[in-house]
Amino acid sequence: MFRLDSISPDLAESFRHATPTRRRKAALVACTLVASRVGLEGEEVVAALEHLRHGGEVEHELLRKIQSLAAWLDDEYLRLDEEGDETKKPEVLRLFSKARAASALGFALSEAPGQLHEALYEALAAVDDATEVIRLVADALRS
């Protein structure tokens, strides 16, 4: 059972039956869409998305940068949340979404194909309403 089952059992089932190529395509679709939606930017993000588009061996330095970005964003949203200041709640949520999007990219870049379902889970967790993301990812898993 994947964590993805907790958000969308149908999508998780489609993932199980998809080819490795379709799984990678679905991860690219999810990561591209959520990075854009949450405003995840930077040279490393652009490079990661380009790598997902074109494939090939992942540069370990790029993966390290994406994982570091995700960890930094996680630390930042947790730090702000622990302050308990309700006026900072929108910023906490913005940082949380960016952290999930960066984490999705990290999982998608992983050389272990088994991590792609984690990329999808993190991408869906990055947005308030995942309906469109689920639809587009499901299309990618089928086509």
Image (cartoon, rainbow, N blue to C red):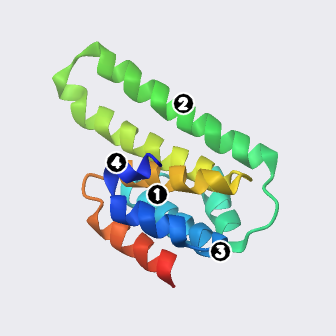
Q: Earlier in the sequence, mark 2 or mark 4?
A: 4
Q: Nearer the viewer, residue 2 or 28?
A: 2
Q: CA distance from mark 3 to mark 1?
A: 21 Å
Residue 75 is labelled as none
Circle 1 sits in a helix, a strand or a loop, which is it? helix
Which residue, given by chain and number where applicable, does mark 3 sit on? 21
Mark 4 or 3, closer to the camera: 4
Residue type, numbered disc 3: Thr
Q: Earlier in the sequence, mark 3 or mark 1?
A: 3
Circle 4 sits in a helix, a strand or a loop, which is it? helix
Mark 3 or 1, closer to the camera: 3
Q: Earlier in the sequence, mark 2 or mark 3?
A: 3
Residue 126 in view here: no
Question: Would you call the spot at circle 2 few (<14 residues within 10 Å), some (14-19), or many (20 or more)?
Answer: some
Which residue, given by chain and number where applicable, does mark 2 sit on? 72
Residue type, numbered disc 1: Ala
Q: Earlier in the sequence, mark 4 or mark 3?
A: 4
**Vertically, is 2 above or below 133?**
above
Identify the residue shown where x is 38% and y is 54%.
124
Question: Would you call the spot at circle 3 few (<14 residues within 10 Å), some (14-19), or many (20 or more)?
Answer: few
Labels 2 and 3 touching (C-beta < 8 A): no
